[in-house]
């Protein structure tokens, strides 16, 4: 046990180190030198571990003792040992140097895109696409990165990116702006979905066959991108389409299941409820394919977002 008077005196002296200049003097080099000597109890071996000569090491220990205001080692010609105050100092210094090492390692990992947290927004339709496998691959390659996954419509994701509340998003290209960087990472055709009992014997249908059926369209405010694609497709039909209701994915598929109508949806959704729904290719292909983009704020500072984008681009 440390004697009370010694502990009190050390604490009183340590309390004097309360100005900015004193804290700056108590730097990592001094604490590392002190911990090394405390562990070796031999200045020669400690100097070898630190890759310095013995005189500079002795000067560092002397400077530290002056700073705290009390001897930390008892030195004789044959031995070196910690004073009671030195033993207390060692317990604190060891924790501080360990924490400093962890801090530096963590900061460097984040700067290299190898650690930290990555907030990823994902649109519901992306959750059923091959991009989900890319998320798993990224997690496997970067196990130290904590993923904060948030599911929202692409319109909401766009707003979150502009406000800087997301690092990166997997979404439909609902808009374009110089403040947001977007790269296409996946494309897929649009297809025609019906209930199974209403399906066609062939696996594909023509656009003219599609417009013969009541269709569920896309809400232009909630799903502007898919609404534009569907509009461009239907514009090429010889007969006008009958839109009986508008909604958003996945509610559109629920309406198809309920028998309200049929729909034109991205192909990735064919994984949903295959026992009730049937998805038909539209031949020949009409209009643009549906795109997924990976997007991030141009002024985003999270280096991990760039690592994530690179992973997705490598798999295109």
Image (cartoon, rainbow, N blue to C red):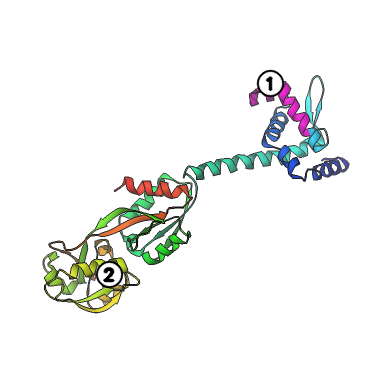
- Residue 227 circle label: 2
Secondary structure, mark 2, is helix
**197 to the left or right of 128:** left
**On the image, numbered disc 1 is attached to which residue?**
53
Residue at position x 83%, y 36% in the image: 69
The answer to which quarter of the image holds residue 16 is top right
52 with respect to 278 (left or right) = right
Q: Position of residue 121 (x, y in %)?
A: 41, 59
Q: Residue 200 magenta-drawn?
A: no
Looking at the rendering, the stretch of residues picked out in magenta corresponds to 43-64
> Residue 36 at what x, y percent from top left?
69, 30
Label 1 sits on a secondary structure element that is loop
Disc on res. 36: none
Which residue lies at the image location 36% right of the left edge and 64% below the top edge?
154
Residue 96 vs residue 229, the one in the foreground: 229
Q: Residues within 10 Å of mark 1 (few under 14, many from 20)?
A: few
Task: Establish if 162 lies above or below 264.
Answer: above
For the image shown, how many numbered marks are present on the structure?
Answer: 2
Q: Judge whether residue 60 is colored magenta.
A: yes
Along the line of sight, the residue nearer the viewer: 213 or 200: 213
Question: Main SS type for the magenta part?
Answer: helix
In the displayed structure, does residue 261 sit left or right of residue 239?
A: right
Q: Nearer the viewer, mark 1 or mark 2?
A: 2
Left or right: 201 with respect to 166? left
């Amino acid at each position: 046990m440390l004697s009370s008077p010694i502990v009190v005196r050390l604490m009183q002296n340590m309390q004097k180190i309360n100005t900015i200049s004193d804290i700056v003097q108590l730097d990592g080099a001094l604490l590392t030198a002190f911990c090394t000597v405390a562990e070796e109890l031999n200045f020669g071996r400690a100097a070898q571990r630190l890759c310095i000569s013995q005189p500079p090491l002795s000067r560092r220990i002397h400077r530290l003792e002056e700073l705290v205001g009390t001897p930390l080692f008892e030195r004789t010609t044959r031995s070196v040992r910690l004073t009671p105050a030195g033993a207390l100092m060692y317990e604190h210094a060891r924790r501080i140097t360990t924490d400093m090492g962890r801090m530096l390692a963590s900061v460097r990992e984040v700067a290299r895109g190898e650690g930290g947290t990555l907030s990823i927004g994902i649109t519901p339709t992306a959750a059923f696409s091959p991009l989900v496998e890319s998320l798993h691959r990224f997690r496997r390659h970067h196990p130290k990165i904590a993923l904060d996954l948030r599911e929202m419509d692409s319109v909401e994701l766009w707003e979150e990116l502009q406000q800087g509340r997301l690092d990166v998003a997997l979404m439909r290209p609902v808009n374009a702006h110089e403040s947001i960087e977007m790269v296409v990472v996946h494309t897929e055709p649009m297809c025609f979905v019906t209930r199974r009992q209403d399906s066609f014997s062939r696996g594909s249908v023509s656009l003219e066959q599609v417009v013969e059926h009541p269709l569920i369209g896309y809400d232009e405010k909630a799903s502007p991108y898919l609404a534009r694609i569907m509009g461009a497709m239907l514009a090429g039909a010889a007969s006008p389409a009958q839109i009986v209701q508008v909604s958003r994915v996945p509610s559109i598929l629920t309406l198809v299941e309920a028998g309200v109508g049929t729909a034109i949806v991205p192909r990735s959704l064919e994984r949903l409820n295959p026992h009730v729904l049937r998805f038909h290719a539209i031949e020949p292909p009409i209009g643009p394919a549906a795109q997924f983009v990976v997007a991030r704020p141009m002024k985003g500072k999270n280096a991990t977002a760039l690592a994530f984008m690179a992973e997705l681009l490598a798999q295109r």
